[in-house]
């Protein structure tokens, strides 16, 4: 859906569900996921339907992911860091997170 | 962030044009000032990524975007403490601010508050609007400004309003292809808009707007549409407008912006329905002071008027704060700023009427989702209203709409309008959610680790 205007600088590595993706310093987690071609990043707790980032400005909460073990973070507000671990959330939020 | 004090003269919430202008003016006048913004950098949405954007070709985003650099530089040099990645989750009438920074929550006090939380895009509830591949136009603009991302597949844009056309021009300049723009502004809007054309013609937006429309229409087919649907199974495949099918990988929706009122409303600020802009807005005096003493609301959060007007409003609110707290300090003459603001606001009525979204795209029917979080359909909301549900707060109890993680931001106006339509009354009568802090989610751990005074502890001990 999205490409980078300039691929230079996309040198950070993060893991999404165990798979490595490249990100650029200055990306938010949501931007890195979009640039990596990840089409949907969660399924909803109500119907289990897939969702992807919608507003990218912190109001829609459709980009919720687990970041470094903390569940339901807004991926569009969290800047990427080297070695960050991102897990997509499938269906109901798991207890204990 | 360890250098955050426990009290300030002024706390500004939101680092867009209003917040930046307010914070720099107040700090220069000698008020101890802190500015909180929840995104990684200042600029708000209009100047998103202004200090860090990877888009170096200035023509892509345009000079109106780059004007934000001066505001950001001014604020940085002003002596105000600028805290980014700082999420304000509560504000109360005693002027206490709850804020989380890097996973740590604090409560700070301020003698004055300027809420500059800006706007968000009006809900665009159409069939399929939750499909991956459907985003807001604002989202695509943010991805371009902040991260240098452009759409790569077949892209269709739909809706109305100045931002839609600006984004189309920016995407084209950045080398993206736009297959079509589905223009949903009803042609009859012209009848209401025409009376305001003379004012608009005098505003700075007239010549800019015309040039923008020409630039986009030369490169992209523009098709009038009264209905838009997103189709696909788990992923957008095609956009259907008035029965015409268009294969697409990305659909960008936009039908104007509305004030982002959650924080101000939760603080107890009185709001009213604006029938021209079809949204709720705070009731304010000429210095943007609200019904809660000490709390002002500036920028588009005070009613939609655009980025340049937002900065002027921020300055006026800051001058009022300086006059109240430090009457001897030198502050600019508000009269000159009021005149500049008036020029900026001229022409808004024309834009509001011209791009007024049609009823069919604001008040969905049947299986179309009104509430994205709790997946409540428009049909369900309408049915509840018909059988006696009188307002949005009762609707929460019946259907859970507005109770998901977005806290009603993406369905609030839709639910109010649907209830008003079914009960044949006005949105002003129906009202809005009763909003309460925390207006952004924080963890129980953060709440539990807030410092507690001895008196507060004793008050609940038995």
Image: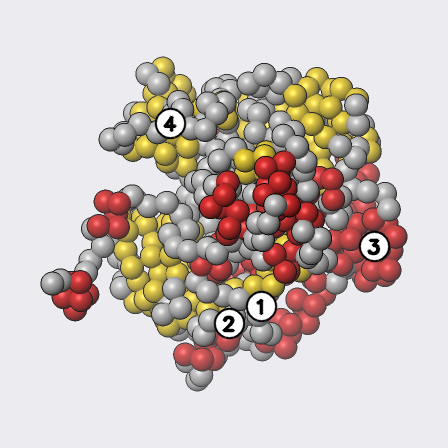
What residue is drawn where x is 49% and y is 46%? B396
In percent of width and height, residue B94 lies at: 36, 70
Residue carrying label 4:
A92
Q: Is residue B369 visible?
A: yes
Spot occupied by residue B255 in the image (x, y as percentages of width and height): 68, 42
In the rendered structure, are the residues bearing label 1 and label 4 in contact, judged by CB atoms less than 8 Å apart? no
What residue is disc 2 on?
B291
Secondary structure of the residue carrying tag 4 is loop
Q: Nearer the viewer, mark 3 or mark 4?
A: 4
Q: Nearer the viewer, residue B402 or B144?
A: B402
Q: Nearer the viewer, mark 1 or mark 4?
A: 4
Give the Cα distance between marks 2 and 3. Answer: 32 Å
Q: Estimate the spatial distance between the alpha carbons at disc 3 and disc 4, rounded to whole Å.
A: 47 Å
Structural crowding at the residue carrying mark 2, measured as other residues with C-alpha within 10 Å and reported as few (<14), some (14–19) or many (≥20): some
Q: Are marks 1 and 2 on the same chain?
A: yes
Q: CA distance from mark 4 to mark 2?
A: 41 Å
Q: Seen in the image, is B199 located left or right of residue B161?
A: right
Foreground tag (4 vs 2): 4
Q: Which residue is mark 1?
A: B283
Write the residue at 22% across / 54% down. B450
Which residue is identified by label 3?
B193
Position of residue B414 relative to residue B83, above or below, is above
Give the quadrant of the C terminus of chain B: bottom left
Are the numbered discs 2 and 3 placed on the same chain, yes or no?
Answer: yes
Q: At numbered mark 2, what does the secondary structure look like: helix, strand or loop?
A: loop
Drawn side of residue B9 relative to residue B26, left or right: left
Give the CA distance from mark 1 to mark 2: 7 Å
Q: How is the image coloured?
A: secondary structure
């Amino acid at each position: 859906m999205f490409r980078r205007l300039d691929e230079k600088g996309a040198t950070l590595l993060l893991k999404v569900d165990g798979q490595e993706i490249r990100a650029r310093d200055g990306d938010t987690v949501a931007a890195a996921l979009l640039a990596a071609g990840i089409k949907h990043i969660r399924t909803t707790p109500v119907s289990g339907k897939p969702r992807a980032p919608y507003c990218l400005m912190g109001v829609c909460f459709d980009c919720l992911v687990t970041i470094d073990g903390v569940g339901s973070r807004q991926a569009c507000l969290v800047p990427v860091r080297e070695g960050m671990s991102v897990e997509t959330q499938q269906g109901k939020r798991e207890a204990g997170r | 962030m360890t250098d955050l004090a426990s009290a300030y003269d002024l706390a500004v919430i939101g680092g867009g044009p209003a917040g930046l202008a307010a914070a720099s003016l107040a700090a220069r006048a000698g008020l101890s000032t802190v500015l909180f913004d929840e995104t990684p950098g200042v600029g708000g949405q209009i100047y998103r990524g202004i200090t860090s954007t990877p888009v170096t070709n200035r023509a892509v985003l345009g000079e109106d975007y780059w004007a934000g650099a001066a505001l950001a530089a001014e604020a940085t040099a002003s002596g105000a403490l600028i805290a980014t990645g700082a999420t304000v989750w509560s504000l109360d009438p005693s002027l206490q601010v709850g804020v989380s920074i890097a996973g740590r929550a604090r409560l700070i006090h301020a003698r004055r508050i300027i809420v500059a939380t800006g706007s968000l895009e009006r809900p665009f509830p159409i069939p399929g609007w939750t499909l991956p591949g459907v985003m807001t136009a604002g989202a695509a603009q943010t991805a371009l400004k902040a991260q240098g991302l452009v759409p790569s597949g077949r892209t269709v844009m739909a809706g109305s309003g100045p931002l839609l056309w600006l984004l189309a021009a920016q995407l084209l300049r950045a080398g993206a292809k736009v297959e079509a723009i589905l223009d949903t502004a009803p042609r009859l809007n012209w009848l209401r808009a025409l009376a305001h054309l003379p004012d608009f013609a005098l505003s700075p937006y007239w010549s800019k707007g015309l040039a923008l429309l020409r630039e986009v229409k030369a490169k992209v087919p523009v098709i009038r549409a009264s209905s838009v649907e997103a189709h696909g199974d788990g992923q957008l495949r095609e956009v259907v407008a008035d029965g015409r099918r268009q294969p697409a990988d990305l659909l960008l929706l936009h039908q104007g912006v509305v004030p982002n009122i959650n924080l101000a409303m939760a603080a107890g600020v009185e709001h009213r329905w604006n029938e021209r802009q079809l949204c709720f807005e705070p009731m304010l005096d000429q210095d943007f002071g609200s019904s809660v003493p000490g709390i002002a609301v500036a920028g588009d959060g005070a009613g939609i008027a655009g980025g340049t007007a937002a900065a002027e409003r921020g300055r006026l609110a800051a001058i009022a704060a300086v006059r109240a707290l430090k009457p001897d300090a030198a502050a600019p003459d508000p009269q000159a700023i009021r005149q500049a603001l008036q020029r900026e606001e001229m022409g808004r009525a024309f834009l509001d009427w011209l791009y007024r979204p049609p009823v069919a795209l604001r008040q969905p029917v049947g299986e179309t989702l009104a509430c994205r979080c709790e997946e409540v359909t428009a049909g369900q909301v309408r049915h509840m209203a018909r059988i006696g549900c009188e307002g949005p707060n009762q609707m929460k109890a019946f259907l859970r709409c507005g109770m998901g993680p977005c806290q009603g931001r993406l369905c609030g106006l839709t639910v109010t309008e649907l209830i008003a339509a079914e009960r044949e009354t006005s949105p002003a009568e129906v009202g809005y959610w009763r909003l309460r802090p925390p207006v952004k989610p924080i963890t129980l751990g953060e709440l539990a680790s807030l410092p507690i005074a001895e008196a507060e502890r004793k008050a609940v001990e038995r």
